[in-house]
Amino acid sequence: MDLDFTPGQEAFRAEAHTWLRAHVPDAPLPSLETEAGFAAHRVWEAQLAADRWSVVSWPEEYGGRGVDIVRWLVFEEEYYAAGAPGRVGQNGINLLAPTLFDHGTREQRARVLPSMATGEVVWAQAWSEPEAGSDLASLTSRAVRADGGWLLSGQKTWSSRAAFADRAFGLFRSEPDTPKPHQGLTYLMFDLRAPGVTVRPIGRLDGKPAFAELFLDEVFVPDEDVIGEPGQGWRVAMSTAGNERGLTLRSPGRFLASADRLFNLWRTQGSSPITRDRVADAVIGARAYQLFTYANASRFLDGESIGPESSLNKVFWSEYDIALHETALELLGADGELADTDWAEGYVFSLAGPLYAGTNEIQRDIIAERLLGLPKGRR
Amino acid sequence: MRFLLDTEQRAFADSLDAMLTAADTPSVVRSWSRGEHASGRALWRRIAEAGVFALAVPEAYEGLGPRPVELAVAFVELGRHAVPGPVVETVMAASLLTEPGLAKRLLPALASGEAMATAAPAGSYALDGDVAATRLTWDGDGLRMAPGHGPVRASLDPARRLTPLLPGGELLTPDPPVTQALTWARLAIAAQALGVGLALLDRTVAYVRQRTQFGVPVGSFQAVKHQLADAKIALEFARPLLFGAALTMTESDVAAAKVTACEAAYATARTALQLHGAIGYTAEYDLSLWLTKARALRASWGDPGECRAAVLEGFSGGRRS
């Protein structure tokens, strides 16, 4: 048992550190949730990609560096420590790409991944529907067979940054009368600017417009944009859900950097004993999350898979993130009510954490049933 | 970087677990609580034979240590089985007695299990001062061998017998490494608390699976499941802090592990009591052995506030492993 990095890993850290210190914009970019911010973040993605820093864990042929999970964690630590911008391509990189690596064809990977790596094509997710949230398998949007492909119809909603994104991926019902709801679903990719697609932006809690609902009216999708076998979409999507909740959605580097910023804020505000315990909890929580992730990364490198354990991860970071931002707003005093601070932006973003990627109630059910072995019951 | 216990460390935990299960530790705890120490002393010797106390004692003084990671592994098991006695204080003594003359005189008996040690700053309570042969205390003059102990006071945890130490006694050293000893104590308690929490969780999961109300196991109710899920989360995030602290042994990391493991164990104790219902509120039901310990450990050798302060004192930001 050790926490030591190899000289190669240290050299990788130094290389990332040097590049980031030279390239991270001095002034923060405008909010990712606005049209101008979205465009600015897309430019940043291209800059990262030009020097192969946008997707370090991918194979080199798709724009990555082929590094293992330890180096990915190291990169993320350096990335957020440098104060680098949020990742506009994160839905595609964190959710669609792992699915393509597991279930896509070589042709699909070659076609989709390079433009995802550069930010040229930004992907949105199309899971939830008005009547299908936590009970995702009850979704009713349809994929109907057509010549050379499928026609998609229905409504998707709560799609993060779909207002500005280029393409989307999600599940559609391709077989209407199956014995169980999670059967007969197909995983498809589609163009958000295709004929038949209407994107209606929805203001999120602070009014920023990047959230959207999608209306689909016989949108044609060619066969080449089906991932996995038609009808097997649930199984394909669950591997994405596993990734989403797992090690890659929120890297420890992000919270280590936030805890550092909170600690510095507390100190510059006079190290008040009133907030000391909560600042300490933020520092401790970031370290706990880092070490928890190192342990899981070590298991992963041993060839173990990370299954329902990722639900522990999801509940922890989502609740941690809110608590950290609440403490920050309190430290800011009267300024804590202002909407245009980085802390306020982070706070509003953090509030969504327990809701998306499987609500924390669903995660706790998974922990209780699959890790603790408690019997299934009514939800 | 491989942040996982190795095969040998896991086998060590398993063998201690098996030994403590076979020893019917709950009945040992109950005897100990009544001041009947014979079975507890016998168990202590077996724990020492397994090498547990030797892990805190340097090789030069007939120990195997210092090996904080293995010590943490062992103390998780001691906590899981609610082992009574001054286990933490004996580890602490090993790190207080670094002066070679003292070490040579007192440490071999601690490593072998021949003697127990207790320790407390002057004016405080020492655990099991009536059983420990080595009673260490420190005041403005330095570290002393207390000449005796006062009357035993009952703790909230009946297995923890609190004794004031008598003033005076032989001055052992004017400048004992109290901070270092405190770090070792906190590491051991963090491990012990994690074990206590894991035992409480295991027992409660088993209980809600078999306890039936409204025609179904109560463990099928979401309100029950979610409390146990939260206990699981708290304990599983305390675990890496514990072993991370054992690797670095910095004051700050150990304080973080101590407060996190103790808070997780205490929260699990509250959940365990709630989900057992009235049977959990009885002394005769064995759950009480862990319920009461979880509260006592939380305050022992650094309460949550002191530990959080220690975390920030050692923190300068930019922590990368």
Image (tube, rainbow, N blue to C red):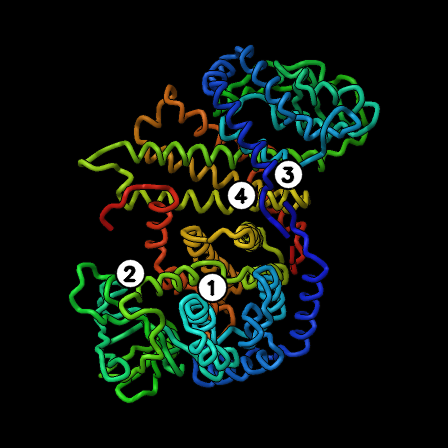
* Residue sticking out furthest to the left: A177
What's the distance in space between the residues labelled 3 and 4, CA to CA?
12 Å
Asked if the residues shown at circle 3 and circle 4 are in contact, with their CB atoms under 8 angstroms apart, the answer is no
In which quadrant of the rendered view does residue B271 lie? top left
Residue B239's label in the rendered image is 4
Can you give x and y, in whole percent of width and height, for residue A195 in the image?
28, 89
Closer to the N terminus: mark 1 or mark 2? 2
- Disc 4 is placed on an element classified as helix
Can you give x and y, in whole percent of width and height, for residue A319 in the image?
44, 56
Q: Mark 2 — residue?
A: A134
* Residue sticking out furthest to the bottom: A195
Can you give x and y, in whole percent of width and height, for residue A198 in the image?
28, 85
Classify residue A133 as left or right of residue A313.
left
Image quadrant containing the C terminus of chain B: bottom right
Front position in the image: B171 or B100: B100
What's the distance in space between the residues labelled 3 and 1, CA to CA?
30 Å
What's the distance in space between the residues labelled 3 and 2, CA to CA?
42 Å
Q: Is residue A70 visible?
A: yes
Report the amino acid beneath label 3: Val
